[in-house]
Amino acid sequence: MNSPSGPSTGRVAVVCGVGGYVPPGIVTNEDLTARLDTSDEWIRTRTGIAARHVIDPGTATSDLAVEAGRRALKSAGDSQADAVVLATTTPDQPCPATAPHVAAQLGLTGAAAFDVSAVCSGFLYGLAAASGLIASGTAERVLLIAADAFTTIIDPDERTTAVIFADGAGAVVLRAGTADEPGAVGRIVLGSDGEHHDLIEVPAGGSRQRSSGIPPEPGEEFFRMRGRDTYRMAVERMTAVSQQAVESAGWHMEDVDRLAAHQANARILTAVGDRLGIPDERRLSNIERVGNTGAASIPLLLAQAAEEGRLTAGHRVLLTAFGGGLAWGSTALVWPDVAA
Ligand code: UT7
């Protein structure tokens, strides 16, 4: 994990737009109990989820990303960006990156465009990449989108993952500004632990399996998660990295007005909030209605909370995520006055 340093000075990235999108299709717990050995009670008590949004056949991650990106650009009041960064676990294809296609769909052909792969921490890794583009002078305005179509990689018959993971997208627009402005992105604390890369994985479809020349077993192309181990590490890591982010922002935990954590599981959110000492009313959550949307989780939460007035200008927000890789991240920022 990177070591603490002072706050950024000079040119920094500033959030100036936000947008979220979920596809219209909804799968309720009742829909799942009709075909899986599960119950509404198990799903609600173990995960906090009541419903989730899913794409229709023929819809891809880029379709979700374009809609969220369009909304974020509208919120920023300017349809231009000179870079598009897309954080996703489910690119449209293994090659090329999905971001150039998304950029083109948004009328941004010519902009720098690339994907970031950090599973559920993708938004925070993407935020670090996007902020770096601005701080270095490589870009003036960056559209950062996080989008996942998890239902394209989960096994619909595997009850543990099928009840949790869902589809959605969220986006922010970042412009060049200064560290003292609301919305300024300061230090982002990031970390990883590849010793545990097999806790969350899609075993087949990459170079390892392909170069072996052995066709994948049925099911190897599906997403797998060792839930209980992941749960334990998620609580530990999100708590620790959040403490580091708050400290490096020069805040105390009591200063945090809103906790915007990756919506992995309601019980994880409760455990992390309790350990950090952030009271329930300061914790943002939408997992009950959208499930776990992977990389999209944090920006979708920010967009919906801003739209509903639960997140307003001046709130000191703590963002934190954990997921496959393993990879995690956290940062703290003052929410700007943006249209939601
Ligand atoms: O987003 C990236 C990071 N992801 C996370 O952080 C997710 C972390 N993990 C979790 O959220 C939880 O571990 C799960 C929700 C995945 C599972 O909850 P759990 O309380 O850890 O359950 P478990 O895996 O220990 O399973 C307990 C029992 C098992 O039955 P037995 O062995 O006790 O008889 C499972 O087979 O619950 C069973 N089970 C289910 N029962 C009904 C597992 N899934 C289901 C289900 N419905 N959908």
Image (tube, rainbow, N blue to C red):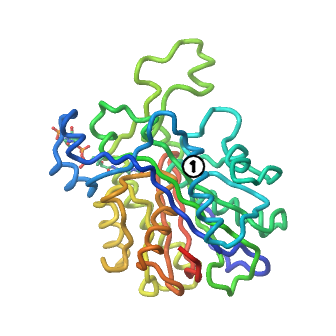
- Vertical placement of 25 versus 239: above or below? above
Q: Where residue 36 sits: x, y (%)?
A: 22, 34
Type of amino acid under label 1: Ala
Tell me if the residue at label 1 has its CB under 8 Å from ligand 1: no
- Vertical placement of 223 versus 302: above or below? above
Image quadrant in which you'd find residue 13:
bottom right
Q: Secondary structure at mark 1?
A: loop
> What residue would you read off at disc 1?
118
User: Which image quadrant shows ligand 1?
Assistant: top left
Q: Where residue 82 sits: x, y (%)?
A: 79, 60
Quarter containing the N terminus: bottom right
Q: Residue at x 72, y 63 (%)?
A: 142
Judged left or right of residue 137, residue 21 is left
> Nearest the camera: 69 or 195?
69
Q: Residue at x 46, y 35 (%)?
A: 152
Image quadrant in which you'd find residue 248:
bottom right
> Total marks drawn?
1
Judged left or right of residue 136, residue 15 is left
- Vertical placement of 114 versus 162: above or below? below
